[in-house]
Amino acid sequence: MDGKVRATLADVAAAAGVSKMTASRALRGAGDVSQKSIEKVRQAAREVGYVGNHLASSLSGRRSDLIGVVVPSVANIVFAEVLSGIAEAIEGSTMQPVFGVTDYGPEKEYGVIRNILSWNPAGLIVTGLDQSADAKRLLKEADIPVVQIMDVDGTPVDGCVGVSHYAAGKAMAEALVKMGRTRFAYVGCGLDTDTRAKKRLAGFTEALLHLGLNLVTTRIGEGRSTVKAGRELTSEVLADWPELDCIYYSNDDLAAGGAFHCIAAGIAVPETLTLAGFNGLDFIESLPTRIITSRTPRREIGKTAALFILEANDKKRQEEGRFLEFTPVIEFGN
Amino acid sequence: MDGKVRATLADVAAAAGVSKMTASRALRGAGDVSQKSIEKVRQAAREVGYVGNHLASSLSGRRSDLIGVVVPSVANIVFAEVLSGIAEAIEGSTMQPVFGVTDYGPEKEYGVIRNILSWNPAGLIVTGLDQSADAKRLLKEADIPVVQIMDVDGTPVDGCVGVSHYAAGKAMAEALVKMGRTRFAYVGCGLDTDTRAKKRLAGFTEALLHLGLNLVTTRIGEGRSTVKAGRELTSEVLADWPELDCIYYSNDDLAAGGAFHCIAAGIAVPETLTLAGFNGLDFIESLPTRIITSRTPRREIGKTAALFILEANDKKRQEEGRFLEFTPVIEFGN
DNA sequence: TTTGGTATCGATACCGGCACCGATACGTTT
DNA sequence: AAACGTATCGGTGCCGGTATCGATACCAAA
């Protein structure tokens, strides 16, 4: 169109016959501009194809329109839904999410947080409460709203939205015992890095103990939690312990794998063997067998966290870090 | 630590007893600095806790370390895996992905692209080849590497990585006919907005026609593609057309729902009824019934697209837009 | 000694916006 | 007519880096 490079505010101002400042004010709806000027500037902006430059305005206005999001993985549908909730919340605003993936690695998490902070984001959403001490210091000194999500078992740096995994594990144990189950196995994957799954397991065994019961066995797989792993681990654990009447999985993916094994092996679920997972993934309810699960409001968590940040940016005063705990609902299927 | 605000390059320079320029060069490994200065500056940076400011360097260096990513949805595991591939590719570089969600809306897509462009990204990855004319103009004039992903049926603006959905639909039809299927139904969701699903359907019916066959019926659901919708639609379509021996779904989620219906209804799959989907989602192979699917390399697509952009940024010369077509592999399960 | 080359460094001028404050125009009050 | 208030606008100076080019020091070559 105009040859080389993108139009700047100066081009718009020149085309409209006003100063840069007036053009700037007109375009972003700041006061002190006549209606006539506003229209002239808008028209000029359209003509030259002005797009604006967030980098410049963020640098100048010492507050960017970027929201940093740090998650352990995006290939996991749970975090994808969190992202989706965040995207929903900032829809309409000029905010844009920029994300980093930690692969459940604390050192990598530190690097990602550092990197994202260097974009001067308006706020930061990070997964979990168990960052390294260095990372927490970074978050504390950042002087922007920080929201830690998914977990509430611990001390948040600032804001916090999530569920108590410890309580979720406990509640599930109690529900299963109430159903008459007594011979439990636990099947999980990647427990060494997934601190939240560990908290659920702790709550689960604690509650069992309280009821005079114990886990018959525990089987921890290598690698990521997948349906396939769940199917294999279930097959293995049942071969060793055929007397089990209930398996608690670290999440729904594994539990679904267990369900598939049972269908293939002709095991009656939930009569002979009861399966329980965590998350309440949507497809669970369409499964041909009943899986018990704790439904977590993943999208709401993302949405709420983003809203916390939007709010904190609106009001000058830096409020106390906001806190919201959701309680997972146990779904028995039907 | 130092009281109010983050340390800047000037602080580092002062602490190291050199000029801003020398500090800048030392920290980013540009030449023309003595080893001694480099160490002094590094030490000083560590002491004052320097984090850098991407906004400033991007504005100054007229090239940012941001990669824009535009996807129709993140709640869909397919695009989540694409993001995962992108994250993997830029791991180690200073690049950071910033993403926008279009919800399959062309106007919203235009807005998102515009918004992301205003961050002066180093490159842009957008889903599909079927943007609005306005959006395409934006992409063309952006003067940065643009990679359109997932689809190759059409004319890319610049780079392109994906699969031919038309060919995938065709290949699936041919494979199913070869297996002896003759009475086909098509079940899909959201066809009005999902242009790639539409291309698969076109290829599928075209191939059937070529083989002297026709779709017995087509059932298009409202809303998003979910396992639940697949189960319901399958139940409905089988009630109306019990003679069907094959259903082609717009994707694997729906097909899995179909499989669950068949398990619950006691229909022999694949003997009585063959089910075919699209995507090759991981959990398909663990299903207790065999579903046929076209496996697409989603993570590779994301990774390759990001690599295209990294490459284009390395070399000064703006090369021809790069192009890579993957061929989906039909998996019959086993 | 003079010349020339290389390695190292710093001053200056931006990048593209926005905050701040002063200037101007015009209508109103006294 | 003088003084004042309000609405509208523009100049200047940064935000925190980097590109560019010139300056300086030091050593080898002529």
Image (spheres, coloured by chain):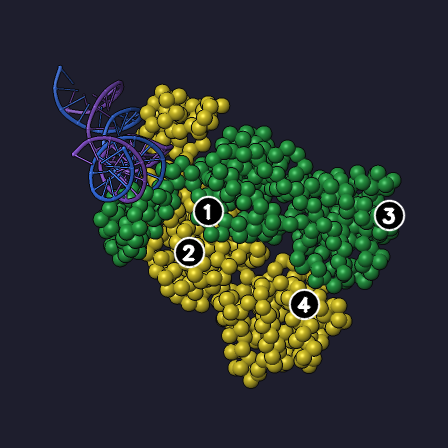
Chain colours: A yellow, B green, C purple, D blue
Q: Is residue A256 left or right of residue B142?
A: right
Q: Position of residue A333 (x, y in %)?
A: 66, 65
Residue at 74%, 59% in the rendered image: B260
Determine if marks 1 and 2 fall on one subunit: no
Question: What amino acid is labelled 3 in the image?
Answer: Thr
Disc with the residue nearer the chain's start (4 vs 2): 2
Residue ID for mark 4: A231
Residue at 47%, 35% in the rendered image: B316
Give me the disc on residue B95.
1
Q: Position of residue D10 (x, y in %)?
A: 28, 24
Residue ID for mark 3: B182
Residue ID for mark 2: A111
- Per the image, label 1 sits on a secondary structure element best described as loop
Task: Find the distance from the CA under tag 3 to the CA under tag 1.
Answer: 51 Å
Q: Position of residue B112 (x, y in %)?
A: 51, 39
Q: Quadrant of residue B70?
A: top right
Task: Find the distance from the CA under tag 3 to the CA under tag 4.
Answer: 34 Å
Number of other residues with Cα within 10 Å of mark 4, as a class: few under 14, some 14 to 19, many 20 or more: many
Q: Chain of mark 4?
A: A
Number of other residues with Cα within 10 Å of mark 3, as a class: few under 14, some 14 to 19, many 20 or more: some
Question: What amino acid is labelled 1 in the image?
Answer: Met
Q: Chain of mark 2?
A: A
Q: Nearer the viewer, mark 4 or mark 1?
A: 1
- Per the image, label 2 sits on a secondary structure element best described as helix
Residue at the far bottom in the pictured view: A212
